[in-house]
Amino acid sequence: MAPLPLVRVSLLVAFSVFLTLVLGFGLPAALNFVAGCFGFPGSSVTECVVVAYLLFVLYVAMPRLPRGTVKSEGKGVLITGCDSGFGHALAKHLHKMGFTVFAGCLLKEKGGDGAVDLAQMHSERMKVLQLDVCSGEQVEKAVEFVRANLENPENGLWAIVNNAGLSTFGEVEFTTMDTYKQVSEVNLWGTIRVTKAFLPLVRRARGRVVNLASMYGRMGNALRSPYCVSKYGVEAFSDCLRYEMKAWGVKVSVVEPGNFIVATGILTRDIVASTADKLWQEAAPGVQQDYGRTHFDNDMALMRSYCGSGQKDVAPVLEDITDAIASRRPFTRYNPMEPYWWIRMQVMTHLPAAISDRLYF
Ligand SMILES: NC(=O)c1ccc[n+]([C@@H]2O[C@H](COP(=O)([O-])OP(=O)(O)OC[C@H]3O[C@@H](n4cnc5c(N)ncnc54)[C@H](OP(=O)(O)O)[C@@H]3O)[C@@H](O)[C@H]2O)c1
């Protein structure tokens, strides 16, 4: 489990001090008075405040509480998008932990580096398969491959990790409908397609579904609408699935990484350059004229500046995905991200938009 971010701990301490002062300076008396005005027995309010506070502390401290882990031996995990980035590193990490890994690679049949690297481990527990999450046919073949290679198909497949994804950017008026569809085809429909196909096996194992969303599945940002739309969809799908799967004993978790651009292949300077050309060329003349080349170039410079940014080490993401797979009591949501993004996400999801918009836009 990733250590608690310093800022989260600082917030907890600050909140504790704040509450101590408030409690010490007579909040209970004030609440008792209000309760009394409404005809309730005033004396119980103090206890309620203290219990609420303890629950809050427990909630914030929870990641540190040991929750037990399941045995990895004999358990299979399918991961999509193992050619590079989180998926590739996760495949190796889970293999090291003793899981049998079914590493879906987009470029296995084309001899992609990531697939070759995993295959060269020459391990019985590292099974590399061709898997384009946009292809119904390949997904069905993957189900057959996994079923045929499980130690005991009757026990099902322990977990699937919907990791395959791509990112793009551009203001709404510069983004074509095709782009919106292409991004969601991988990030959202790919996730749904793979999940639906593997659920019968996962249900049998009373196992896990882990979906890679993003901090941009919880909050929007300028220039990121195609990506945000797809990741908000992943969040919605995961929530609905979680309610349904409760009856089957399957746990559904969403992992919402912050910025790990520098550590993965999700956004490179080449991608920014080619996307910029495409955005400008495909924009309607009226849009080009209204926004102007200077404004557009500034946007692209901003995106270019993100290329070398973010956390260099993917360990926090790997630890959270691993927790979702291996913990006896996985969390619903994981937020491996830098303090800046964690605070921004809390502000944007918990405060009125009138306040968060003023702070960030
Ligand atoms: N890196 C971050 O900062 C960050 C932040 C939040 C969330 N995420 C999410 O984390 C997940 C992994 O991304 P990453 O950062 O590790 O980026 P990455 O290095 O680009 O990995 C994504 C992988 O998915 C593969 N892929 C693309 N289309 C596919 C398809 N149709 N079928 C199967 N695989 C496909 C890619 O293959 P090709 O490279 O060959 O296209 C790539 O290997 C994504 O869902 C992403 O949205 C990343």
Image: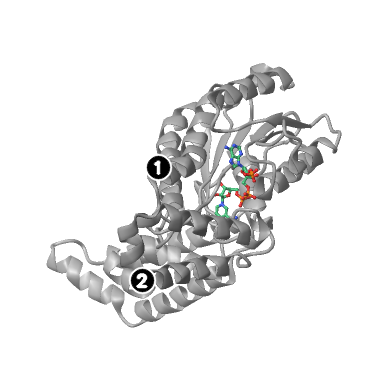
Q: Which tag is nearer the camera, tag 1 or tag 2? A: 2
User: CB under 8 Å between callouts 1 and 2?
Assistant: no
At x 51%, y 48%, the residue is: 213
Would residue 181 appear left or right of 211 to someone viewing this image? left
Q: Which mark is residue 225?
A: none
Q: Secondary structure at mark 1?
A: helix
Quadrant of the image occupied by residue 87: top right
Residue sitting at x 62%, y 37%: 80
- Residue drawn at (58%, 71%) of the image: 6
Q: List x then y, in percent, for residue 83.
A: 69, 42
Q: Going from the N terminus, do you reach mark 1 or mark 2 first? A: 1
Q: Is residue 349 left or right of residue 64?
A: left
- Tag 1: amino acid: Ala
Spatial separation of the CA atoms under disc 1 and disc 2: 25 Å
Residue 347 in the image: above or below residue 199? below
Q: Is residue 336 visible?
A: no
How far across and down, in percent of the image, does residue 192 sit? 48, 33
Quarter of the image containing the C terminus? Answer: bottom left
Q: Which residue is mark 1?
A: 236
| Side (left or right) of 57 relative to 155 | left
Report whether residue 32 is seen. yes
**Label placed on residue 361:** 2
Q: How many residues crowd around disc 1 within 10 Å: few (fewer than 14), some, or many (20 or more)?
A: few
Circle 2 SS class: loop
